[in-house]
Amino acid sequence: MRWDNISSPSEFILLGLSSRPEDQKPLFVLFVTIYLVTLMGNLIIILAIYSDIHLQTPMYFFLKSLSFVDICYTTVIIPKMLMNFLSDAKTILYSECMTQTYFCLSFGNVDSYVLGAMAIDRYVAICKPFHYITIMSYKCCVLLLIISLTIPFLHSLLHVHLLNQLTFCASNIIHHFFCELKAMLKLSCSSTYVNEIVIKTEGLCVVMAPFMCIIISYLRILTTVLKIPSAAGKYKAFSTCGSHLTVVSLFYGSISYVYLQPLNSYTVKDRIATVIYTMLTSMLNPFIYSLRNKDLKQGLGKLIGRIKSQ
C-alpha cells in the first residue's frame, strides 16, 4: 500500500517473520509457547525471591527487577504479534505503533541498565567483600534501579519524538514483526539523517554506558580473582558471575548485530537477531539463573513446596 503526501498514516502493516499463509499457525504455536514460558519462568523467579527471606539481597533484588522488565518487554511485542499470525489484515494503528516503539526501546534499554547494575553488584561482592553490605545498601540498589528506569525512558522519548516528525509517504508495510525503530526509519520518504546521527551518538552513549560498566566491573573482577591462590577459590568467585555473563553475551551480541550496521543493510537476518534479544533472552533468563544458582534452586524448591501444601 502506498500514499501520496501523507505525513501521518492511519495504520501500518506488520509483515512479520514470514508472509506465507502456511507458516502462520506454526509460528503462532512457537511464539505463544515462548510467551507462556517467559511469563511463567520470570513470574516464578519473582515469587521465589519475594517469598524467601534468604534471597533478600542486592543480587536477587536486581534479578527480580530483570524478570519483571522481561515480562513487560515481551508483553509489549508478542500479544500483537500473535494476533497478526491469526489475522489476514496484520495492521497496527499509527498511534499504537509509536507507543509500541517507545516501550520496546524503553524496556530494552532498562534490561541493559539492570544488567549493568548486576555487574556492579558482582564487582563489589568479589572485590570489596568486607564493604559489600555498606556499599550495596537498599538505598543504593533503589537509586541504581531508578537510574535504570529514568535514562532509558527519557532516551526512548527522544527517539520516538524524532520518529514522529518524519513523513511516511512511500509505504505502510513494516518489514518486521513489531514497530522496530530502524524498520520504521526505512519507510520514511523524508530525511532520516538526524535520526541516524542521534542513534549513533546519544543512542550509542546510552547503550554503551551500562555495557562499559559491565566491562570495567569484570576486568576488575578478573584482576581480583587471579590473585586468589587456590583454584577452588577462583572457581567459586567466577561461578557467581557465570549466569550473568551468559545473559550479557546473548543480549549484547544480538543487539549489536542489529544496530551497529548501516540502515540500508537492514535484512531478514536482523529480524531473527531481534527475536534473540527481545524474546529468547527473556525466556532463557530464568533457566540460566536458576540452573546455575544453588540458593535460587533452594528458593524455588521452597516455593513449590508451599504451593503443593496448599
Image: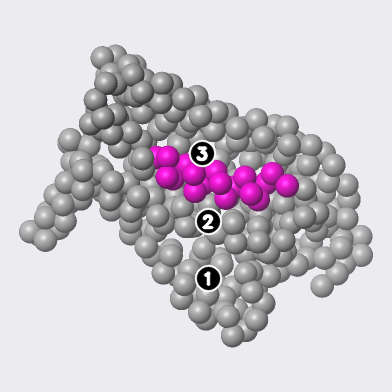
Q: Are marks 1 and 3 in contact (CB under 8 Å)?
A: no
Pinpoint residue 52: horizontal percent, then vertical percent.
Answer: 18, 41
Q: Earlier in the sequence, mark 3 or mark 2?
A: 3
Q: Residue furthest left?
A: 309
Question: Tag 1: residue type?
Answer: Leu
Image quadrant where residue 155 sits: top right
Q: Position of residue 199 (x, y in %)?
A: 72, 39
Q: Which residue is mark 3?
A: 112
Specify few, some or many for label 2: CA neighbours under 10 Å numbering under 14, 14-19, or 20 or more.
Answer: some
The colour mode here is one colour
Name the element at disc 3: helix
**Residue corresponding to mark 1:** 82
For label 1, count other residues whose C-alpha is less than 10 Å away and answer few (under 14), some (14-19) or many (20+).
many
Q: Secondary structure at mark 2?
A: helix
Badge 3 amino acid: Ser
Q: In the depicted view, which residue is nearer to us: 136 or 4? A: 136
User: Outermost residue toward the right?
Assistant: 4
Residue 166: image location, x then y, percent:
82, 49
At x 58%, y 37%, the residue is 153
- From which residue to which does the magenta span run? 244-261
**Up-down: is 250 above or below 194?**
below
C-alpha gap between disc 1 and disc 3: 26 Å
Depth order, front residue of 20/125: 125
